Amino acid sequence: MKIYNKLVRDKIPEIIKNQGKMPKLKKLDGKEYFDALNQKLKEELDEYFEDYSIEELTDVMEVIYAIIKYNGLSIDEFEEIRRNKLDERGEFNDRLLLIDVD
């Protein structure tokens, strides 16, 4: 038996069963789910930083989408917030590093 104690995507239990194994699951709610999402975000970011894989970055985005939904927003509402911030503060296209300010 291997112990994971981590949030997994919805189809993972089915995949495990198809391998002839039996997953033990617990459905999370409330703060416990939110905490697990944040832990998963850290895990996925760590995996991304290992080799800068775009595939790992998609996992980061999936967790971010789940956090957005947990907070009661739609992806469209989140995108509107993102666009507003983009209009106010810009993007990262100019590749600027702020050294200091006098």
Image (cartoon, rainbow, N blue to C red):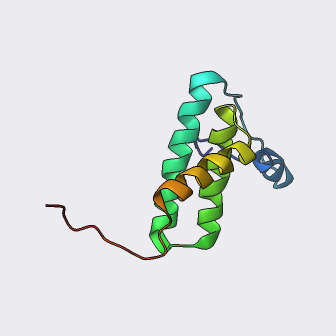
Q: Please name whichever residue, 10 or 90, is drawn nearer the observer in this view of the structure.
A: 90
Q: Please name whichever residue, 27 or 31, is drawn nearer the observer in this view of the structure.
A: 31
Location of residue 61 by image quarter? bottom right
Quadrant that contains the N terminus:
top right
Question: Where residue 3 appears, x then y in whole percent?
Answer: 58, 42
The residue shown at (59%, 64%) is: 57
Q: In the image, is 71 to the left or to the right of 18?
A: left
* In this view, 72 is above or below 102: above
Q: In the image, is 89 to the left or to the right of 18?
A: left
Q: How many labels does the image show?
A: 0
Location of residue 30 by image quarter? top right
Question: Where residue 31 appears, x then y in whole percent?
Answer: 57, 24
In the rendered image, is residue 5 in sight? no
Q: In the image, is 93 to the left or to the right of 61?
A: left
The residue shown at (70%, 43%) is: 77
Q: In the image, is 17 to the left or to the right of 90?
A: right
Quadrant that contains the C terminus:
bottom left
Location of residue 49 by image quarter? bottom left
Question: Where residue 29 appears, x then y in whole percent?
Answer: 67, 24
The residue shown at (67%, 51%) is: 79
